[in-house]
Image (cartoon, rainbow, N blue to C red):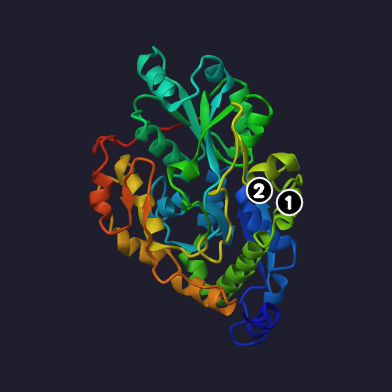
Amino acid sequence: MKDPFNTALAWVNGSDAPELNSVDVGFMALTDSASLVVAATQGFAQPYGLNINLHRQPSWASLRDRLVSGQLHAAHSLYGLVYAAHLGLGGQARDMAVLMGLNQNGQSINLSRALQDAGVITPEALDRWTHQSDSKLTFAQTFPTGNHALWLYYWLASQGIHPLRDVDSVVVPPLQMVEHLQAGRIDGFCVGEPWGAKAVSQNLGFTLATTQAIWPDHPEKVLGCSLEFVQQYPNTARALVMAVLEASRFIEQNMDNRRSTAQLLSAAEYVNAPAEAIESRLMGEYDDGLGNRWTDHHAVSFHRQGQVNLPYLSDGMWFMTQFRRWGLLREDPDYLGVAKTVQQLDVYREAATALGIEVPDSPMRSSQLIDGKIWDGSDPAGYARSFKLHALADAAPVVADL
């Protein structure tokens, strides 16, 4: 493997030196911002002639607006947020880019203590409740086109619950999720950690499902930016990817690094949550609040020898199939063509190769999801139409803000 320090010097001192020596990067108060926080604060960016200025955002909508407007050079982003911005869903279209995957897995669906007390602690019980109760349950997710909305919808639909008809869906920023659950404004939520773990530790409910149970090793957050940023500052984009890749690898070198990362993230300027709430699920140790404890073999992962970080074309395409499924897209897009524009495979390959990180042979991967369906990117339009539960073609979902 190449010496990372010498590799960094080669980039910084040559014609490949970054065009910018300082970049403004947005993030949300979530455990899966870890690789960006580590890269910015633990000396991984400076060898590449780069300084990463972190800017915590109050909501995904705020992050999206600042990213699209150029106030942020790049950001810890929802996959669905980047693709929605590119396609013009919820605003004017802006050519967007995914530089790399930041993590896989590590989100959860939690239900309230009231439902727990009522015995609604299994998917079957939830199915009965939603179809027999006179009032609809209210579930929160974090952004209308975001990952958590799509995990929630996919999981509910896999249990026979139509997520746009049988329940109400509202948008709540991650930092406010536990507060809304405690106040009884919502009956459940899908969110990134540590907020699911915190709700359990405060006895406010339980974890009914993890997102890795929906799709083992599913795509999650990405390092997103505008396509203009990549085109205008290609060396800066590559240097940023290299710094974050090194930080990702560092986090997974050993369990002590994960523990120290949890401690770092707990600080007020980052996630602002107790270290123990962050550490448990970061280490893969789960307590669902119902007395079940286990070590999850598909817990949040930041690197896994580069398997996490390649911006797979099929990952980007999957999110578009779900936009189509739930009526956010009225027609099939050019799934592969859009993904080839957004996913910055060349930038990633250059960065990974320079660091001696193996790049998977194919930008497509195959997975089996909770409903038994196989996703491999080979027939995205057919896949989008293949689901029993979906939105009407002429009716886009209405999702409220709390």
Q: What residue is rendered at 53% in x and 44% in y?
A: 61
Tell me if 187 is positioned left or right of 7 in this view: left
In the image, is residue 359 above or below residue 304? below
Tell me if 37 is positioned left or right of 122 in this view: right
**Camera-side residue: 241 or 88?**
241
Tell me if 156 is positioned left or right of 402 in this view: left
In the image, is residue 43 above or below residue 194? below
Give the image location of residue 307, x and y in percent: 50, 63
The image quadrant where one finds the N terminus is bottom right
**Camera-side residue: 70 or 221?**
221
Q: What residue is rendered at 47% in x and 45% in y?
A: 147
**Camera-side residue: 96 or 262?**
262
- Give the CA distance from mark 1 to mark 2: 8 Å
| Kind of residue at disc 2 | Met
In the image, is residue 329 above or below residue 134? below
Circle nearer the N terminus (1, 2): 1
Which residue does the numbered mark 1 point to in the structure image? Answer: 259
Give the image location of residue 219, x and y in percent: 47, 53
Under tag 1, what secondary structure? helix
Under tag 2, what secondary structure? loop
Which residue does the numbered mark 2 point to in the structure image? Answer: 283
